[in-house]
Amino acid sequence: MLIRRDGLEFAIEDSAAPIHNRSGKVTGAVIVFHDVSQSRAMSQKMTHQAQHDLLTGLPNRALLTEHFIQAIGLAKRHCKQVALLFLDLDDFKHINDSLGHAIGDQLLQSVANRLTACVRNTDMVCRQGGDEFVILLAEIDHPQGAAQIAEKLLGVLVKPHRIGGQELHVTVSIGISVYPDDGNDVETIMQNADTAMFHAKTNGRNNFQFFRDHMNINAVHRLTVESSLRRALKQEEFLLHYQPKVNLASGALTGAEALIRWQDPDIGMIYPGQFVSIAEACGLIVPIGHWVLREACRQVRAWLDSGLPAVPVAVNISAVEFRHIGFVEGVASILKETGLAPEFLQLELTESILMHDADSSALVLDALKAMGVRLAIDDFGTGYSSLSYLKRFPIDTLKIDQSFVRDIVTDTDDATIVSAVIGMGKNLKQRVIAEGVETQAQFEFLRDQQCDEGQGFHFSHSLPALDFSFLLADGNCLISQNAGDAETDSSLKRSPPLSI
Ligand code: C2E
Ligand code: MG
Ligand code: MG
């Protein structure tokens, strides 16, 4: 290092050559100083670039791995733990696709800044690539410490990001894995945090999950199902079954719920409980849901075209679909394409979907309502509802969850809840339908409480489209005229159309 007269220091390389006289004695030397500040700066810059992400300036995976190995060494010595948080932004791809990469990049930078502000100097936030970030929490005393940070991150990220003159909203799903409980090396801890993050996605996004051993078995299962689902979409292995909805006072068929089935060539029929959450987590629910909507609309239109007295069909919409940009436009274009009048389509949404971001839900619901589509709240009573929103949302129907219906005859609490929901629906001018009606006694209780409609095995299981068309053609009274009698003579679960 040389110091110039003005005090500035600069890096040098020096070399010296002796000066000899004739007799070979050293009489002096030539010393050469070479200014290397530029090349040194360049090499430092290159090292930095190799270890950092260009867009956000955060450390990259290579640097994180280095630090992680050091953190593990320290934790071992000090009997502490190290936590790894794997973060994946929810629906980032849609922001990128719809608003452009420049906005997407700025959002990533804004997220990076907020993440960095949430952790200690000794921790490390790294960008893994795309919309994935990894946070290393060095030397924690207890996994609970990681949970607190995760909670803080969720809270900080959910606040709107001001970018390009607009407010963008983004949430994140977080998986947490801890050294030494969940693995002894970087690779395993990283893998397990990723798996836990996936579970946070299936758990509705915008939450965090700790890694659990059983998740690994599920991870393999998830990958197989995911690739089979892709194939199923391509090879058209999905189909819809239709479950009748019945007017409890008259027995008339009032509508149907379309329920997806997957006819796997090897396994056979697979029910939504086994694949819908996986499709939601990997985003495949969007094209699958699109298929369901189009197929349901096409089918009702075909029934109408063949002269049948078709009824409205309800389609279940998952959270991921509902929040997907372009959902409303998608519904409109399917109605246009199939030529179905909008009042023949009902969308079933759960309370948690609607309450998640109630203000933006209200906008989407208003747009759908303006289009003429009918709206129902599914599984009502199992989620958290704000009554003031419930009043504000343009909802046509409340669907009482089957868990309340199951014990209405034996459990006075459930009976009270069901009566209260029926009363509330009446006051809010919403129709009330009970799902999971399995027995004559449940049916009679609901009818006596003036519940408008019912759906369940007591009236009919869900039916393939052809069987449902027989039901439409049949003039459709689904309950016995003397319904107070024993079960023997009436319900569809014992008689056609199941056997038609
Ligand atoms: P859900 O919307 O609450 O649908 C009612 C479920 O209860 C259906 O199960 C139906 O077959 C079943 N069920 C009907 N009556 C009775 C009864 O009397 N007793 C009992 N125990 N169960 C009855 P399924 O078809 O297995 O569907 C399960 C869930 O999967 C649905 O719950 C819905 O949340 C979801 N799902 C179904 N189809 C779709 C779809 O196309 N898209 C999306 N996103 N989700 C779907
Ligand atoms: Mg439903
Ligand atoms: Mg339901």
Image (cartoon, grey):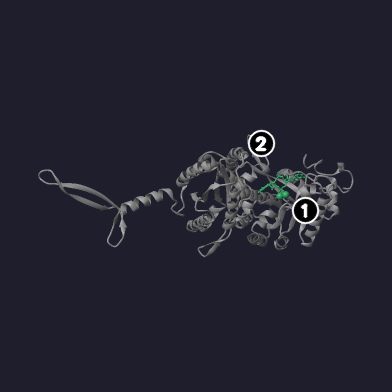
Task: Name the disc covering residue 433, or none.
Answer: 1
Of marks 2 and 1, the one in the foreground? 1
Q: How many marks?
A: 2
Q: Is residue 250 visible?
A: no
Element under disc 2: strand
User: Whole-percent x and y of residue 159?
Assistant: 58, 60
Q: Is residue 279 visible?
A: yes
Element under disc 1: strand
Q: In the current view of this chain or complex, which residue is farthest to the top?
A: 266
**Foreground of the two, 205 or 479:** 205
Query: Left or right: 144 with respect to 433?
Result: left
Distance between mark 2 and mark 1 Cα atoms: 32 Å
Q: Few, some or many C-alpha atoms within 10 Å of disc 2 (few <14, some 14-19, many ≥20)?
A: few
User: Whole-percent x and y of residue 245?
Assistant: 77, 50
Decide: is 402 above or below 159: above
Q: Which residue is mark 2?
A: 268
Disc 1 marks a residue whose amino acid type is: Ile
Q: Earlier in the sequence, mark 2 or mark 1?
A: 2
Question: Which image quarter holds the C terminus?
Answer: top right
**Foreground of the two, 35 or 342:** 35
**Foreground of the two, 19 or 278:** 19
Query: Left or right: 482 with respect to 279?
Result: right
Disc 2 marks a residue whose amino acid type is: Gly
Q: Few, some or many C-alpha atoms within 10 Å of disc 1 (few <14, some 14-19, many ≥20)?
A: many
